[in-house]
């Protein structure tokens, strides 16, 4: 019988990172792909991105509604409670042999907690990383401890997972799925993108700004500083991708909408561009600005400078193309000016990368083919 591998996704970014793996599992004779969507995918407020998953040709086995109409910390906790109730029912129906999750979202923590109690083994992608400015950091490490298999991006992250007490023979360094996407992407042309966006992209800033969840109630003042900095670069067009459903995420998205409306000749904002359009836009951007992991992981592979604002990504390995700065107008202006300078750009072409990946999804599937899933939930603590 085919072994059932269940992939759970709750956000647009996470889905993009899992797409190649989902295709690989679908094409493997001994596996049956089960796909469960939840979180922002099902929310009209965040673009109902489950529709894009269906347009991409994937069959969604189950949908788990969980998001409350709230972006407070209390609302997030209650959403996690709803998620666990929903996933308990879904996993009872689907009876997966293995659940595969990625990253550090609160939706995925609820998945991992449910699977642990139901004795379903979990494979976790992108563990061992550090993001000191967000609760995601603790969530990621918690998911690591709830998981039986680990697929980190590099050897440093593998060492960190071992330090958390996980057995080395359960940890497989496979590279980063986001970099794999870049290596395999059939990019849209600048002409196609300009036709879609409706303005010239020869001088473009691509911006994603999420709440720094360990700095509560700071989103409004932080984004105001970013807007003031962007006003100093009137000759650049700007594309925003909006915030996730974290605490204060709605405030950020409302402010982005207001800024877009005031500057609608040169600013556009979107909940989701889709994987191909987003990476194609990133490829031609003059600089990536904000605090998203795509500026840390994907942008350097394309030799695109990143202005990384604030503490959200503090602790991550960073390439030479990334400029860290505080969330103050003058600091942001100085960092952007440095990023677009010819001297800075000339030094990026052959820089060493901190993240890479060529056949990440293929490697994961090959590893899974040789494993006995039935023994994975029996774990032994590894003293470091």
Image (spheres, rainbow, N blue to C red):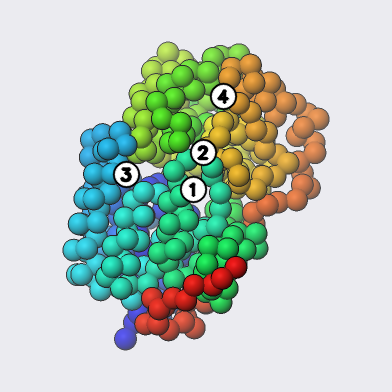
Residue 137 badge? 1
Q: Is residue 8 above or below residue 68?
A: below
Separation (CA) of disc 2 from disc 3: 22 Å
Which of the image's four quarters has the C terminus? Answer: bottom right
Q: Quadrant of the N terminus?
A: bottom left
**Is there a contact, CB below 8 Å, between mark 4 and mark 2?**
no
Spot occupied by residue 50 in the image (x, y as percentages of width and height) = 30, 50
Alpha-carbon neighbours of circle 2 within 10 Å: few (<14), some, or many (≥20)? some
Q: CA distance from mark 3 to mark 1?
A: 20 Å
Which label's residue is closer to the chain start, 4 or 2?
A: 2
x 68%, y 33%: residue? 323
Q: Residue at x 40, y 49 (%)?
A: 105
Q: Which residue, given by chain and number where applicable, does mark 2 sit on?
A: 133
Which tag, 4 or 3, sits closer to the chain's start?
A: 3
Residue 226 image position (x, y, % from top left): 53, 21
**Mark 1, residues whose alpha carbon is within 10 Å: few (<14), some, or many (≥20)?**
many
The count of marks equals 4
């Amino acid at each position: 019988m085919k072994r059932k591998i269940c992939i759970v996704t709750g956000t647009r970014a996470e889905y993009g990172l899992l797409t190649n793996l989902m295709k690989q599992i679908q094409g493997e004779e001994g596996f049956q792909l089960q796909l469960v969507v939840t979180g922002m995918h099902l929310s009209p407020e965040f673009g109902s991105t489950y529709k894009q998953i269906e347009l991409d040709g994937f069959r969604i086995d189950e949908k788990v509604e969980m998001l409350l109409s709230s972006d407070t910390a209390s609302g997030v906790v209650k959403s996690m409670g709803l998620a666990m109730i929903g996933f308990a029912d879904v996993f009872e129906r689907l009876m997966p042999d293995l659940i595969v999750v990625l990253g550090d979202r609160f939706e995925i923590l609820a998945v991992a907690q449910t699977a642990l109690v139901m004795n379903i083994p979990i494979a976790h992608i992108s563990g061992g990383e550090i993001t000191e400015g967000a609760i995601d950091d603790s969530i990621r490490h918690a998911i690591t401890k709830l998981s039986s298999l680990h697929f980190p991006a590099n050897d440093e992250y593998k060492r960190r997972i071992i330090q958390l007490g996980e057995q080395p023979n359960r940890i497989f360094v496979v590279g980063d799925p986001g970099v794999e996407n870049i290596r395999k992407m059939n990019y849209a042309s600048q002409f196609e993108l300009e036709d879609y966006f409706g303005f010239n992209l020869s001088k473009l800033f691509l911006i994603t700004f999420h709440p720094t969840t360990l700095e509560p109630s700071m989103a409004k003042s932080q984004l105001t500083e970013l807007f003031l900095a962007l006003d100093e670069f009137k000759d650049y067009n700007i594309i925003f991708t909006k915030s996730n459903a974290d605490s204060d995420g709605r405030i950020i998205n409302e402010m982005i909408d207001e800024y877009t409306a005031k500057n609608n000749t040169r600013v556009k904002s979107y909940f989701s561009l889709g994987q191909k359009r987003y990476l194609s836009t990133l490829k031609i951007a003059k600089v990536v600005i904000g605090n998203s992991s795509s500026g840390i992981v994907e942008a350097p592979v394309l030799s695109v400078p990143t202005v990384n604002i604030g503490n959200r990504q503090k602790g991550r390995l960073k390439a030479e193309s990334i400029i860290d700065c505080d969330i103050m107008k003058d600091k942001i202006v100085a960092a952007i000016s440095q990023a677009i300078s010819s001297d800075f750009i000339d030094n990026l072409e052959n820089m060493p990368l901190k993240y890479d990946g060529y056949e990440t999804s293929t490697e994961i599937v090959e590893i899974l083919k040789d494993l006995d899933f039935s023994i994975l939930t029996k774990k032994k603590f590894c003293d470091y």
